[in-house]
Image (spheres, rainbow, N blue to C red):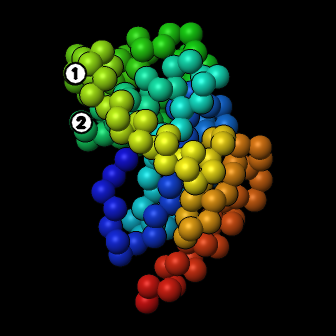
Amino acid sequence: MSDTDPARPVLDVWCALQCPDCRTALADLRALRDRFGDALEIRLRHFPLERHRHAHAAAQAAEEALAQGQGWPYAEAVLARTGELAERGELLLVEIARELGLDAEEMDTALIDGRHILIVDADQAEGKAIGVTGTPTYVIGGERLDGGKSQEGLRARIEEIAARLLDGRS
């Protein structure tokens, strides 16, 4: 969900925006942002899971929010309401856009016309190709870390890898 700066390490976060485990992972992502700031690029990568009925639409909506300049705030707002998303689906996605001051009509149109489907599908295909099977899954420095079963210790491991990559740049 961003342009890559080759001068800084990238943490790809494979996520389903209706996944309670991904919602839990937000605390770790915030801590990583606090520690590394702009030195570490954190990219949301879409991996909608079939068991989450509205995850594919939520991923498309996050891409529209990115196009409107609020990709991460939108993704975090959707993750904060995963239970509600299960009940309200696309209506909630448009409502969240409105709450964040995005163009809600354009969000609704994007969900109808599917303009971001290819981005979401490409992310999912890439995830499958590198062995992602559940969410959240992290990739940093060529290492895949699976948080789908347990997130215990993952933030510390990501911090170690990021610090090593950042030290290697100097």
Q: Residue at x 42, y 61 (%)?
A: 41
| Residue 112 x, y percent position in the rendering | 30, 15
The answer to the question of whether label 1 and label 2 lie on touching residues, with beta carbons closer than 8 A, is yes
Q: Quadrant of residue 153?
A: bottom right
Give the residue number, with chain letter if any, for mark 1: 106
Q: Residue at x 49, y 67 (%)?
A: 36
Q: Residues within 10 Å of mark 1 (few under 14, many from 20)?
A: some
Q: Residue at x 35, y 35 (%)?
A: 118
Residue 107 shows in this picture = no
Asked whether, in this view, residue 164 is left or right of residue 157, the answer is left
Give the residue number, with chain letter if any, for mark 2: 68
As rendered, which of 144 and 24 lies closer to the eye?
144
The C terminus lies in which quarter of the figure? Answer: bottom left
Q: What amino acid is found at the position of numbered circle 1 in the picture? A: Glu
Asked whether, in this view, residue 41 is left or right of residue 25, the answer is left
Q: What amino acid is found at the position of numbered circle 2 in the picture? A: Gln
Q: Residue at x 43, y 32 (%)?
A: 59
Helix, strand or loop under label 2: loop
Please determine whether, in this image, residue 157 is positioned above or below residue 51: below
In the displayed orientation, state which residue is furthest to the bottom. 170
